[in-house]
Amino acid sequence: MHNKTIAELSRALAAGEFSSQELTRHYLDRIQALDSKYNCFISVTEERALADAVAADQRIQAGTATPLTGIPLAHKDIFCTQGIRTSAGSRMLDNFIAPYESTVSGNLAAAGTVLLGKTNMDEFAMGSSNENSFYGAVKNPWDTAAIAGGSSGGSAAAVAARLTPAATGTDTGGSIRQPASHCGITGIKPTYGRVSRWGMIAYASSLDQAGPMARTAEDAALLLQVMAGLDPKDSTSVDQPVEDYSATLNDSLEGLRIGIPQEFFAEGLDSGVEHCVREAVKELEKLGATVTEVSLPNSQLSVPAYYVIAPAEASSNLSRFDGVRYGYRCEAPTDLEDLYTRSRAEGFGAEVKRRILVGSYALSAGYYDAYYIQAQKIRRLIKNDFVSAFEQIDIIVGPTAPTPAFNLGEKSNDPVAMYLSDIYTLSTNLAGLPGISIPAGQSAGRPVGLQMIGNYFSEARLLNIAHRFQQATDWHQQAPVTTDA
């Protein structure tokens, strides 16, 4: 059962080949048997999962099921789930039981999905390797010596290891696409505002966006259909009609105009990754696309711009964690200042502290104009580059990450090298554009992702292109050998 896609599982459930309870128990058994290898899950919600499965079977029998009814999935532990621990991968929230449900998890629950548990992540979504979690690093199912990617590494690894058919993720600077690339799965970051952020613990509010992670573009379309839409509770949610993402999956790619940014093929790109991407582009050409070179001259400034803007917003968002209202509280504080200081010092990890310090510095008097305002100006230039490019082309194609997954610990002591692993994904978030990563080959035995970036609200087109590519290739069907139970 675990080798079936969501679409295949949905058809099998509808046909009565097995029940949601049988399917759910199968995945729970796999998690129990295999997750100790990968550390994908922070919490496994067995009791909730079995109850959800019973309710799903009743809906199927009553004829009121949706395509996702009875499908097990997992949520990145950044989405608040009522009555269930929501930790954001941090000691600060290790004891936090969410009193309400996020819009994303609520929409998926209403569709009849079954919650298997909450997945591991970089603390407060700050990281590119999933080594910053209070609960330990996530290991890549393709090679357990390698990182799974971050910050949604637990979700990506769980899907790759066939511990769940799908999982939710969040993408602030590439945190859906980069781990999807490293783990050989499909992950889409929608246009900013396409999916509600309500109930999603904030890192950088102008950049954060939720999205689905699954084996195939077809599965991602089914998930995004339920996740997307206007939410009155989220002031950044966009009032834009939600397309039928599945309806156009098989549309022809004849006449598709692909842009290849010259800046994405410069120094630092692994030769094996480049080979896979260029071969993937040839495959798209066979399907009817035409290719032209474009320039995104300011994309190389995305790293410094992002690492001013995101920490600045994080320093503000994380100021609420003070040891007073909820979350970690130090023992026996002597006064209020001691309570604040020790609770935050003990509750936050090193990377979170680093970004809070950087952000507070960038926003401080005398430096706000020199750093934060300049970074926002660069952000506008990056967006303008994309606007100009999309006047000539339909999508931008390139690598998701400059290298395959690197080894655990390889970049832990070099924050700049770690930050550069997101160089091809950051600009998409700064511009608020949608992007998708799909499996496109392997380099040194580790998966390589192909990134496609579309114009605003072009998720249906991205999923269509990804689906047609996956019909013509089999990279998305390959599984890590370590997943054998």
Image (cartoon, rainbow, N blue to C red):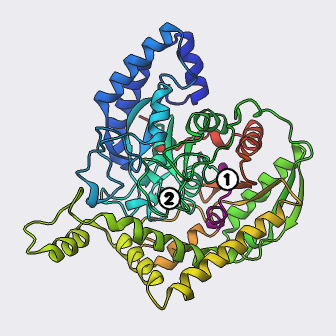
Q: Is residue 18 above or below residue 472?
A: above
Q: Is residue 61 left or right of residue 332?
A: right
Image x and y of residue 26, in percent: 40, 25
Judged from this view, the residue extending furthest toward the bottom is 366
Residue 439 forms part of the magenta stretch: yes
* Amino acid, disc 2: Gly
Q: Which residue is mark 1?
A: 434
Q: Quadrant of residue 471?
A: top right
User: Looking at the rendering, in which quadrant would you find the C terminus?
Assistant: top left
Give the x, y percent position of residue 353.
35, 74
Going 41% across and 78% down the picture, which residue do you hit?
Answer: 413
The quarter of the picture where residue 304 lies is bottom right
Can you identify the residue that label 2 sits on? 149
Residue 117 within the magenta-colored segment of the rendering: no
The mark total stands at 2
Mark 2: give few (<14), some (14-19) or many (20+) Cα within 10 Å: many
- For label 2, the SS is loop
460 relative to 51 in the view: left or right: right
Q: Earlier in the sequence, mark 2 or mark 1?
A: 2
The image quadrant of residue 41 is top left
- The reply, left or right, for residue 84 in relation to residue 153 is left
Q: What mark, if any, has residue 377 been given in the picture?
A: none
Residue at position x 48%, y 37% in the image? 162
Report how far apart the C-alphas of labels 2 and 1 lie in the structure.
19 Å
The residue segment tinted magenta is 424-441
What amino acid type is highlighted by mark number 1? Pro
The reply to whether residue 268 is in sight is: no
Q: Is residue 198 left or right of residue 468?
A: left
The percent coordinates of residue 169 (x first, y second) are: 50, 48
